[in-house]
Amino acid sequence: MKFTFKAKNKQGELKEGSVEALNDEGAIEVLQQNGLFPIYIREEKGGEDVVKAFLKYFDRVSDKELMIFFKQLSILIEAKVPIVVSLISIKEETKNLYFRKILEDVISDIQDGLPLSDALKKHKTVFSILATNIIRAGEASGNLKKSVDYVAKNIEKNYLLYTKIRSAMMYPLIILTVFFVIGFLFITFIIPRLTAVVKSLDVTLPWYTQMTITVSDFMAKYWWANSLIVIGVIGGFFYYIKTDNGKREWDEVKLKMPLVGPIFQKLYIARFADNLNVLLEGGLPIIRSIFLTSSVINNSVYQGIILKMADEVKIGGSMSDVLRKSGHIPPIVSQMVKIGEESGEIDLVLRYIAKFYEQEVDVAAKNLSTLIEPIMMVIIGIAVGVLVFLILMPIYDVASQL
């Protein structure tokens, strides 16, 4: 099979290309033999099932659906139901057509002799590399049920953390969107009507009012062009942050944003500790666990930190040294990791770190909702005051002189 890769050499330079190997682990080994440390590896595919591609265009598999899938699978495995029968039962209850098609492929592969982990691994856009590796470790140790439990709990924790952040930010986003739309409509359609009578009187208006009238006249005349520009800017922003450079810059911006930046930091630390803990408890080697954690952290800044940890551990160093030198990791985290390394109970320490920062995210998200509401009221009040000063007061003064 052929794999495309992105990797860094010992000098930190980014390298991209392709490599031939039997599987992704073989591809990783080839890269490491050539002095490269992979950031990601993807299998090149000649084509995709037409039906599956069509369904994927209209649907996707959410974290909630994956969480439910693995929980149901764990219950059925505990009840001694064969894997194929379990998957068929779950598929019949799945409403997501794209996910049903994926499960059909997984069932077919297992019936052809593939283990569950390899069957899931063929669908990397749905099942994460972390999940497939935990399940593979469970198959090797003969404790598949425990591994599926690990995956289900891991997905559930990530889902709940992300939901808390999204819920906390949804309110201000809705308020800002409505405020922007109303402001656009007011400047484009309302202000020209208010100022039409004043302009017909040919009176002298303050420069700032005249400037506002000129802007509103332009908006009224070319509202369609301005709408296209706004849509283009928003679409361009979302397109750019999906590129490698754009995602890297946006990841850095998120950590520096006021109010929400510290919440994102806590979120990524909790995700790092929880994922690494799950992998270590699942029986995976430390370097492999660190590498897999970096691939699911979903932030390029923290991904870089975790990859440095893998490099340090490979040469006999410690994770805590890398964490201590990073400006994005609180000192308490590096100190706790150091204690875990010295005591040989790193998985236990990581579990405590994950639990602590999950609680911190919960509290911070609730505080954010409480804090943002008065800030939004102040912003709206200032905007209304500026509008009165620029337009309504001069119009009132002119009207009072008639």
Image (cartoon, rainbow, N blue to C red):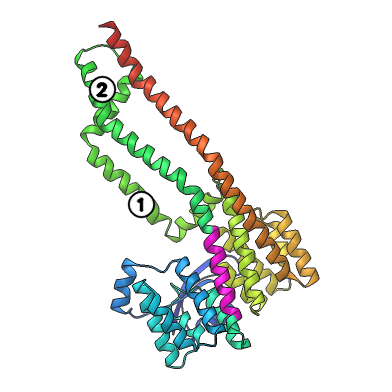
Report the residue at 65% width, 70% height from top: 277
- Specify the quadrant that holds the N terminus: bottom left
Residue 367 % position (x, y):
59, 44
Mark sitting on residue 194: 2
Q: Residue furthest bottom?
A: 113
Residue 297 visible within the image: no
Q: Residue furthest left?
A: 200
Report the residue at 42% width, 59% height from top: 242
Residue 343 % position (x, y):
80, 70
The main secondary structure of the magenta stretch is helix
Q: Is residue 352 left or right of residue 8?
A: right
Residue 237 visible within the image: yes
Residue flagged by tag 1: what amino acid is it? Gly
Residue 267 % position (x, y):
59, 57
Report the residue at 58% width, 76% height from top: 149
Q: Is residue 162 left or right of residue 385?
A: right
Indicate the quadrant where residue 336 lies.
Answer: bottom right
Q: Which residue is mark 1?
A: 236
Report crowding for label 2: few under 14, some 14 to 19, many 20 or more residues within 10 A (C-alpha). some
- Specify the quadrant that holds the C terminus: top left
- Secondary structure found at label 1: helix
The earlier-in-sequence mark between 2 and 1 is 2
- Secondary structure found at label 2: helix
32 is higher (above) or lower (below) than 207: below
Q: Which residues are magenta?
A: 146-161
Query: Residue 284 magenta-drawn?
Result: no
